[in-house]
Image (cartoon, grey):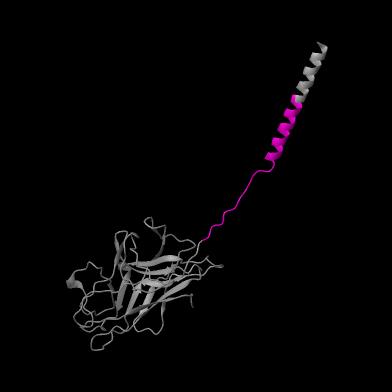
Amino acid sequence: MTKSRTLKAAMLVSVASIACLSFNNLGASADTLPSTGKSQADVSFTSNGGSTNPVDPDNPDNPGGGGTGNNGPLSLDAVPTYLNFGTHTQPNVDTAYTLLSKDASQESLATANDDKTQNVTTSGKKNGNDIIYTQVSDSRGTGAGWQLKAQLSDITASDGQVLTNASVVLSGGTPQYLTGEANQQSWVTAADANQATVATPIVLNAGASSTTDVATATAGSKVGDGQGMGVNQQYWNINNVQLHVKGGHAAAKNYSGNIVWTLNSTPTA
């Protein structure tokens, strides 16, 4: 009996020792965690040399108007092709004439200086209000900035007579840029790191020899860290777009002038 109990005791000790060794080995495996791996993701892009279509300033799922057809990767995509300030009695005093919307009646429209064409204002809608807008697209990926400027020619009649001392003034402009993927896009109007700046007021004197700042996107301190990247717009309520005419300066004629909008790749003084 003694010999049997002794053997059993020895067996129990042996089993206990084996169990102890087994737990020690599991502890050693746990010390090697976490176990890691690596996946490399690659993507390539080619230069965006095509044109960007105008986008509706209110609902980006819809197309806009005033397309220029300019090619990128930095491009001026849209401007108001026509601005109609209406037909009025000759002013005796200095007078400001507010831009008409595209829905203005034919009777109220001005006639171009070809003395036969009535062009409707190229306007859109934003939050239910009539607006005009410009659009700039920057897909360079550098954040190098850009600057939009404008210049108003002489405003002349068909016989060459100039409407002297006239100006077009745009005030209270708002910048916005497009965000989100296709079919889920929206306009951002709040000021942030990407939002360009719109000058106000913008005074375009007829026959000016130099350009006037309209909007500026500032370059960042490092590549890809500037303003105005992607699709940007600048818009003005038509009530804030006016033609200023000096009293006694307008003859009973049809006058026309041109605003030339110019986009530079780098902000200039």
The residue that appears at 29% across and 68% down in the rendered structure is: 123
| Place of residue 40 in the rendered image (x, y in percent of width and height, measured from the top left) | 56, 57
The image quarter in which residue 61 lies: bottom left
The residue that appears at 24% across and 72% down in the rendered structure is: 120
Magenta includes 25? yes
Magenta highlight range: 15-42
| Place of residue 173 in the rendered image (x, y in percent of width and height, measured from the top left) | 38, 67
Residue 173 makes an appearance in the image: no
| Place of residue 247 in the rendered image (x, y in percent of width and height, measured from the top left) | 27, 81
- Compared with residue 126, is residue 162 higher up or lower down, i.e. above or below? below
- Choose between 86 and 263: the one closer to the eye: 263
Residue 1 makes an appearance in the image: yes
- Labels in figure, total: 0
The image quarter in which residue 181 lies: bottom left
- Choose between 217 and 6: the one closer to the eye: 6
Residue furthest to the top: 1
Report whether 104 appears left or right of 183. Answer: left
| Place of residue 116 in the rendered image (x, y in percent of width and height, measured from the top left) | 18, 80
Report whether 3 appears left or right of 171. Answer: right
- Compared with residue 13, is residue 44 higher up or lower down, i.e. above or below? below
- Choose between 2 and 158: the one closer to the eye: 2
Residue furthest to the right: 2
- Compared with residue 2, is residue 239 higher up or lower down, i.e. above or below? below
The residue that appears at 79% across and 18% down in the rendered structure is: 7
- Choose between 44 and 163: the one closer to the eye: 44
State which quarter of the image contains the N terminus. top right
Report whether 170 appears left or right of 87. Answer: right
Magenta includes 265? no
